[in-house]
Image (cartoon, rainbow, N blue to C red):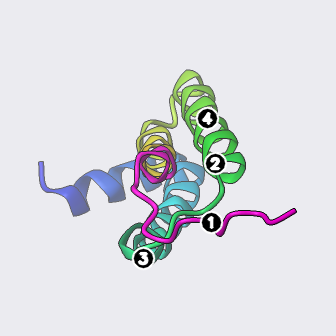
Amino acid sequence: MPTLQLLLLQLNDGRWQDLALSAGNIFFCFTLIPMLRHPGRPPLLTCVPTGLALLAGGFVFATLHLWLTALTQTIAGLQWLALVFKKALYAAPAQRI
């Protein structure tokens, strides 16, 4: 079944919430790409909690049978966790006493 027909079928089944939430997640996935490509790395205290919270949210959406939202939120969480393993090109300057 083509993707468009599957999306239209979900609209007819009353799953418009799944489509609306997943559209927002897809938007955030695309807006995170420049951060993944940037040579610097955001702070770990930003990446780790955000990634874990998004993965937990993906699990919650899966238990609500909002499968598309669960998938897109999990992808966003994995993107944030990928930032953890990114090599920081800019070393922090040493503190002087």
Horizontal arrangement in the rendering, residue 18 relative to residue 68 (left or right): right
Q: Residue furthest top?
A: 63
Amino acid marked by disc 2: Leu
Answer whether residue 87 is magenta in the image.
yes
Give the Cα distance between marks 2 and 1.
14 Å
Above or below for 65 versus 97: above
Give the Cα distance between marks 3 and 1.
16 Å
Label 1 crowding class (10 Å Cα cut-off): few <14, some 14-19, many 20+? Answer: few
- The secondary structure type at the circle numbered 2 is helix
- The x and y percentages for residue 46 are 69, 52
Amino acid marked by disc 1: Ala
Discs 1/4, front: 1
Discs 2/1, front: 1
Q: Is residue 27 visible?
A: no
- The x and y percentages for residue 26 are 45, 64
> Which residue has dot 3 on it?
38
- The x and y percentages for residue 17 are 60, 52
Question: Which residue is nearer to you in this view: 2 or 87?
Answer: 87
Pointers 4 and 3 in contact (C-beta within 8 Å): no
Q: Please tell me in which quadrant of the rendered image residue 58 appears.
A: top right
Quick one: label 2 or label 3, which is nearer the N terminus? Answer: 3
Disc ID at residue 44: 2
